[in-house]
Image (cartoon, rainbow, N blue to C red):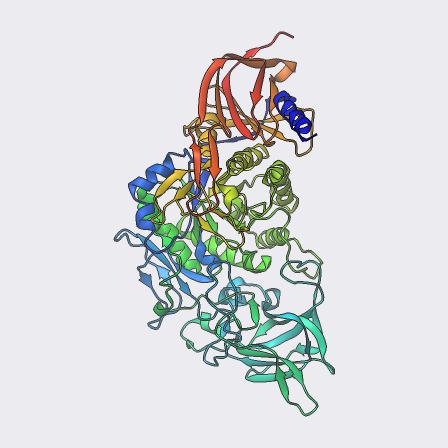
Amino acid sequence: MIAVVLAAQLASAQLGRQLAVTVDIAHAANRLVPLRSIGAGLDAENPGADAVIYAPQDVSAMLGSGLGAITYRLYTELAVQAWHWNPNGTWSSPQGGYWTGSTAIGPKIENSYGYRLPGRGNTLDQANNDNYSRLDDGNPQTYWKSNPYLAQRFTGDPDASHPQWVFFRFKGLRKVNAIRIAWSNPYAISYAVQYWTGADPLYAPAAGRWKNFPNGVVTNGAGGTVTLELANAPMRVQFVRVAMTASSNTCDSHGSGDPRNCVGYAIDEIGIGTLGPSGAFTDIVVHAPNHTQTVTYASSVDPWHDASDRDTYDEVQPGLDAVFQSGVTRGLPAMVPVALLYGTPQDAAAEIAYLRARGDAIRGVELGEEPDGQYVSPEDDAALYVQWARAIHAVAPGIPLGGPVFQGSRSDILAWRNAAGDASWLRRFLLYLRSHDALDQLAFMSFEHYPFNPCDPQPWADLRKEPSLASGILGVWRADGLPSGVPMYVTEANFSAYAGAVFQQLVGGLWFADTVGSFVSSGAGGVYLYQYAPEPIVHFDLSCQTFGEYGIFAGTDGFRVRQPTSQYFAAQMLMNQWAQPVDAFHTIFTTRTQPAIADGPVTSYALRRPDGQYAVLLINKDPAQSATVTLRFTGSGGATYAFGGTVTRATLGSAQYVWHGNSRTAYAAPDGPIAVAQAPASATYALAPGSMMVLRGRLTALAR
């Protein structure tokens, strides 16, 4: 019986699917320059790695992929750190304070560093996660302080429109009827102590509300240490928040010499628990200067720091000069970031002025990175965006600015509901810009794309979902109110936010090609793969015991290229076979497949190159069954065309690439190259199981 089943499966695979693909060349779906719009991202690295990565050997290997422009990713935003893009600059006071990098052209900037913030209020972060909150560190000499740029002095808005908050997350329901707050300066004179009514305020922010404790509202706060009885009897809660809406505007420990020291809110320590009949306070908060503390989150952090706060053993950002002068940008305009959440507008403006003075080509400036991952409210992020945009445009008029740089998502980003009940993060961000006459400051919208779980045992099934995910998320952003004239860029993308072997397997390369085709055919302005540099294959805790790494290479421990992997060859297919490797516009066309199947096994993407050739990318997402494709082109007036003369056919499948093993020394064999051949045009084209193919040539009209 088994033999009969296997024989039937083999026969089915050999017969394959019969499909008809029609390319509509009468209507353009998009128009872009692939060299500028299909590229890769560069990020922070281990100390010492940048000297290797930006040396000629690695740069030459990266350029060999054919990928075009680069985006520079800002790891410090994820780490809750200030970024010194330039090691030279000035502090706002002799003791430290607010940093502004120098615009003077000096020695080449090889590396740049993050600085830990002494006013931090988050226990956890999305980087190396090796710092802690000052709200419950047990040290009365430290304090959390909110970002002064969210105070009325800088936003022009009433402080109540930008409530600052801190909240505590217990491991389960706990009895609470009291809170003890040791205020620092400036303190809140108006605040409310609240509890969450839903399951989880971070992972289901629209499925609950913050509700005031019965006795939790304070309107005449006087600072100092305050113990409040929140309810007559203990309530069982898991999340407790202090929301602050009016400040004393008294100056913090750094003095009155800088107005930024005297706005916002600051708290030394918070205890939460119960008050007994005798008035004794029982604290359930764990106070410790590490992750054993009760987990806390804060709305914002004051970017004040000093020279001693430099992170000397975490990841290191590459120097902007090292990147631009290495040749890795190909001389094309790059997407660069400025620090937003933990920086200052003066420093952001100085960075862009410096790059312009150096003559470095900039395609756009992303303001910050992943505010949704840092749980920043849309109104707060938009308020910072407006201030930063105006500061940058004062020194670089007209330079394109964008954001918010969402972390990877498959659906609308949600926030805690506002008074009107709106939970859409982007819609509220756009409404703030519009209400402050600043919507024109948003020249592009950018976001990340990490759609799947690397642990999924069926990555080929995931691959079939990608086109609808890409077109769907672009539709979400437009439905949120993003103006039709504002382009969208996927400035960081890969199969998953956590690396696993699927990245190196053939399916990872097909995913990249399909993602690019899906997004640009749906109207996106560009897609950038994460990441570009050679990285060693490692084991990620969340990757289900598989070894893998982001990007186009298997690297050595010394950050040299050990061998190219599937996404490298997918990049070559896109950039050298599908697109023409020239700095010129290409026209993207829509395609239609019959029989039509939702999330079907074969997808197609077509374009016209500057040399006049038409190229069609076909991807077979079924690793077990081949497909036979009949290809036609329809023009205006009902005219039909097909490839004529000689057709160039490029193929990447299991005959060209296979990944072996599950260890740090896993490898590919065969490891390319792409199979490229020329043959007379045909009525049909065979597509092997689990493969992709580019067909390229000139068209000939068919008789009507």
In the rendered image, the vertical position of residue 183 relative to residue 43, given as above or below: below
In the image, 615: left or right of 26? left
Closer to the camera in the image, 444 or 201: 201
Q: Is residue 699 above or below residue 127?
A: above
User: Residue at horizontal 56%, vertical 65%?
Assistant: 299
Residue 330 in the image: x percent, y percent? 36, 37
Instruction: Give the image quarter of residue 687.
Output: top right
Position of 318 with respect to 10 (left or right) is left
Give the farthest residue toward the top: 703
Between 174 and 635, the one lying in front of the other is: 174
State which quadrant residue 86 falls in: bottom left
Q: Is the residue 591 above or below the residue 506 in the image? A: above
**In the figure, is residue 284 to the left or right of 232?**
left
* Number of numbered callouts drawn: 0
Q: Quadrant of the N terminus?
A: top right
- Could one spot residue 611 in this view of the protein? no
Percent of width and height locating residue 77 = 47, 57
- Taking the spot 60% from the left edge, 25% from the top edge, the residue there is 626
For this orientation, the residue located farthest to the bottom is 278
Could you say where residue 178 lies in the image, as x and y percent from the top left? 66, 81
The C terminus sits in image quarter: top right
Q: Residue at x 62, y 61 (%)?
A: 202
Question: Does residue 183 appear in the picture of this structure?
Answer: yes
Q: What x and y, as percent, mark residue 640?
A: 62, 14
Placement of 173 over or under 229, stated as above or below = above
